Amino acid sequence: MAGKICDRLIKKVWRSYAYENVPEEEGLYVIGLEEARDRVTYLYLGYSNNIHRRLKEHKYQSLLIDEFIKEQFSENNGTRLRIKWVLEPDSKLDEGKYLHCMEQKVGDLRYNIKRGNSY
């Protein structure tokens, strides 16, 4: 199951970091940084019971990814930040599996805090 959801996330189109257009629903989301035209580096995978709210919170909290997002908004109004998401109810318990799967498929997500081998 984790592999299917990872594939769905990977296939999604990157969007600008405009959480206003993101649903207030449960699921997984990915934050990326546009390095060059049509090339985005995956930075972070998260889960939330309200993706819209969580993406907004990243601009005001103090995790490593939050600090990076604040820096990007300070430097260039977040123009290089990208997001994509899948609505996936009841996915909190498997978040570690999704993280592991994503890292196998796209490489290290440098802003996710590693929890040992809990996945």
Image (cartoon, helix red, strand yellow):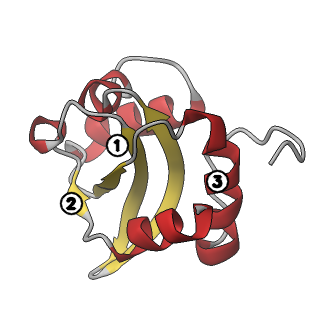
- The residue where tag 3 is placed is 99
Label 1: state its secondary structure.
helix
| Viewer-closest of 67 and 113 | 113
Q: Nearer the viewer, mark 2 or mark 1?
A: 2
Label 1 sits on residue: 72
Task: Please tell me how crowded label 1 is: few (under 14), some (14-19), or many (20+) other residues with Cα within 10 Å.
Answer: some
The x and y percentages for residue 116 are 89, 42
Q: Which mark is residue 43?
A: none
Question: Mark 2 to mark 1: distance in Å?
Answer: 16 Å
N-terminal of the two: label 2 or label 1? 2
Q: Are marks 2 and 3 in contact (CB under 8 Å)?
A: no
Please identify, in this view, whether the residue under mark 1 or under mark 3 is nearer the observer: 3
- Say few, some or many: other residues with alpha carbon within 10 Å of mark 2 (under 14 / 14 to 19 / 20 or more): some
Q: Is residue 36 above or below residue 115?
A: below
Question: Disc 2 marks which amino acid?
Answer: Arg
In the rendered image of this protein, does residue 117 appear above or below residue 24?
A: below
Residue shown at the point (33%, 53%) measured from the top left:
85
79 left or right, relative to 119: left
Q: Residue furthest left?
A: 21
Image quadrant assignment for residue 94: top right
Amino acid marked by disc 3: Leu
Callout 2: helix, strand or loop?
Answer: strand
Which residue in the structure is indicated by mark 2?
15
Using the numbered discs, state the Cα–Cα distance from disc 2 to disc 3 in whole angstroms: 20 Å
Of residue 103 and residue 71, the one placed in the foreground of this image is: 103
Residues at circles 2 and 1 in contact by the CB criterion of under 8 Å: no
- The x and y percentages for residue 1 are 58, 63
Q: Is residue 91 above or below residue 108?
A: above
Q: Position of residue 12 (x, y in %)?
A: 30, 70
Residue at x-position 38% and y-position 27%: 49
The three-letter code of the residue at mark 1 reads Gln
